[in-house]
Amino acid sequence: MASSQRGLAAASLLLRVLTLLLLIASLVIIVTNKVYAPFTDVVDPPNLTFRDFSAYRRIFNRSLLFYLKYVLSAAVIGCAYTLLLPPFAAIHVAQGKRFGRGRGIALLIFTDVVLAVLIATGAAAGLGLTVEFQRSPQDSDFKNFLNLVDVSCGLMLGATICMVTMIMISVHPLT
C-alpha cells in the first residue's frame, strides 16, 4: 500500500472515530435532557427525562414527541453502524491492506451515504422542530430543553460532515 493510500485509510479511520464520538455525545445529551415544566413552582420538582414518554405526552404535543423519537433513533442507528466499522478499518490500516475491493467498497460507500442521510435528516428534523417551538413564548425550562436539543442536533450535523468527508476519502481511490 502506498503511503498516500495508508494516509487516506488512517484519515478515514480517524473520521470514523470522530463520527462515533460526536454521535455518542449527541445521544448522551438527548437521553439526559430534563424538563421540569409543569412543576416549576414545586420546591423539589420531579425529573422528567426522555425515558418518561407518558409524562412527555402530557407536556408536549405528539409532533414534538415524534420528532424527538426520530432524532434519537437516527443517533442510535448511526452510533451502532459507526461502532461496527472502526475495528475492521483499524485492522486493514495495520495490515497495510485496502479496506474493501470491488463490490465490497461500493456496498460500504452506499451504506455510508444512507447513514449520512439518515443522521442529517434526524438532525434537521430536530433543529427545525426546536426553531418552530422557540417561536412561541415558552418558560425557561422549555427553552433550556430546546437549547439542549439544538446542541445535540448540532453534534449530529458535525457527525454528518465527518461522514461526508469520509465518503469522499473512500471514493478517491476509485477514481
Image: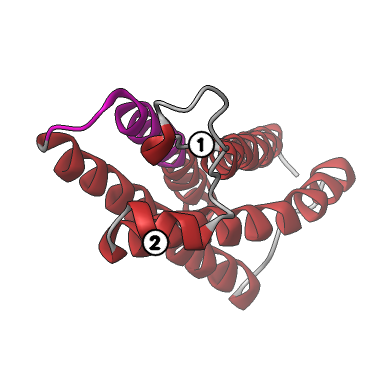
Is the stretch drawn in magenta largely helix, strand or loop?
A: helix
Work out whether residue 12 or residue 120 is closer to the camera in this orientation and state it: 120
**Residue that badge 2 annotates:** 57
Work out whether residue 106 or residue 160 is closer to the camera in this orientation and state it: 160
Q: Earlier in the sequence, mark 1 or mark 2?
A: 1
- Identify the magenta region: 137-157
Work out whether residue 148 or residue 56 is closer to the camera in this orientation and state it: 56
**What secondary structure is found at the residue carrying circle 2?**
helix
Indicate the position of residue 30 as horizontal and vertical percent values.
Answer: 52, 42
**Residue 149 is at least partly visible in this image:** no
Q: Which residue is drawn at 60% across and 34% down?
A: 25
**Residue 150 is at least partly visible in this image:** yes
Residue reaching furthest to the bottom: 103
Q: Residues within 10 Å of mark 2 (few under 14, many from 20)?
A: few
Indicate the position of residue 161 as horizontal and vertical percent values.
Answer: 41, 39
**Residue that badge 1 annotates:** 34
